[in-house]
Amino acid sequence: MDDIAVPVVIAGERCASRVSAQVNLIDADARGIHMSRLYSLVSAIATRGSLTPKIVRELLSEMLKSHPKLADRARLTIDFELLLERRALASGQLGWRSYRASIDGQLSEQGAALKMSVEVLYSSTCPSSAALARQLVAAQFVEDFPEGADQQTVASWLNSERGMRATPHAQRSSAQVEVLLPDAASAFDFPALIDCVEAALKTPVQAAVKRADEQAFARLNGENLMFCEDAARRLQIALGALDMLDFSARVRHFESLHAHNAVAFVRKQQS
């Protein structure tokens, strides 16, 4: 079954979710599953309070028990958007950010495996483009001041349009992160995972923005020039410090220069 609408509580927030509930058919002659049984089990999520790994494991077990002699594997995927209040970089204003996230649980004879995934949007400024822009600014300065200039003149020039002869290209970017939870995990701590990713990348997109916040964001971009490979390696280090059995991250830079995207992928374990 796919696209089952049900409310779930994640990190204290009530979220609208879409659920996929699956069981396999071990009997080659079986024609279908008991859809009403799965629907009833999934719908009951709404009454069980904050969703935890324990609840998901129990639900997977109940899904199998509802199909005796028909199935020996079950899978549950819960897709939702989590709203988190985020503070502006400089002004301190609060605003809401929406994060696409999901929980994936599978149960088989080998046991249960639970995964969390989230997408974090951020800004990336191209190091190569920044270097080329600096070359043009330097060339313009030499042209405008062949004999040099005093400090005040230079400061005024840098604050003029001629002092911004070229700008590096930047683009909105996406980090899709998936982590495999340890068996002892007691919660789906999405806020902590999101904080980890945003702290590693350093340039997450903002919610409430005043001029001071925009300037602070521009400074962060200038201090964190990165290709997609750089972003992926930052995530590999940050996620590697977490207590997770496995993780993977796929970053995409939606190029403002090219008509195609730049993509990089990392994971904890090599397969």
Image (cartoon, helix red, strand yellow):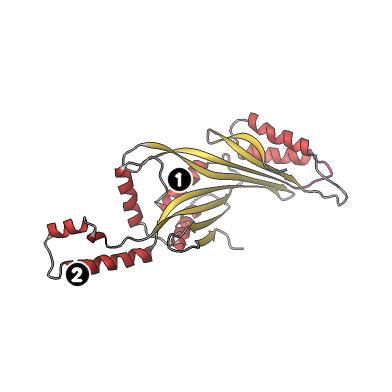
Q: Is 26 in front, or is 16?
A: 16
In the visual, does 106 lie left or right of 15?
Answer: right
Select label 1 or label 2 by which is in front: 2
Q: Quadrant of the N terminus?
A: top right
Q: Is residue 85 above or below residue 215?
A: above
Q: Which is more toward the observer, 163 or 115?
A: 163
Crowd class of label 1 (few under 14; some 14 to 19; many from 20; radius 10 Å):
few
Residue 101 shown in magenta: no
Q: Is residue 256 above or below residue 243?
A: below
Tell whether position 71 is magenta: yes
Q: Amino acid at mark 1?
A: Asp
Which residue is depicted at the point 51% across and 61% down? 263
Q: Which residue was labeled with disc 1?
A: 195
User: Would you identify the image quadrant in which residue 6 lies?
Assistant: top right
Quadrant of the frame with the C terminus: bottom right
Q: Left of 214 or right of it: where is 266?
A: right
Disc number for residue 45:
none
Name the residue tied to disc 2: 143
Q: Position of residue 37 (x, y in %)?
A: 77, 36
Identify the element where label 2 is drawn.
helix
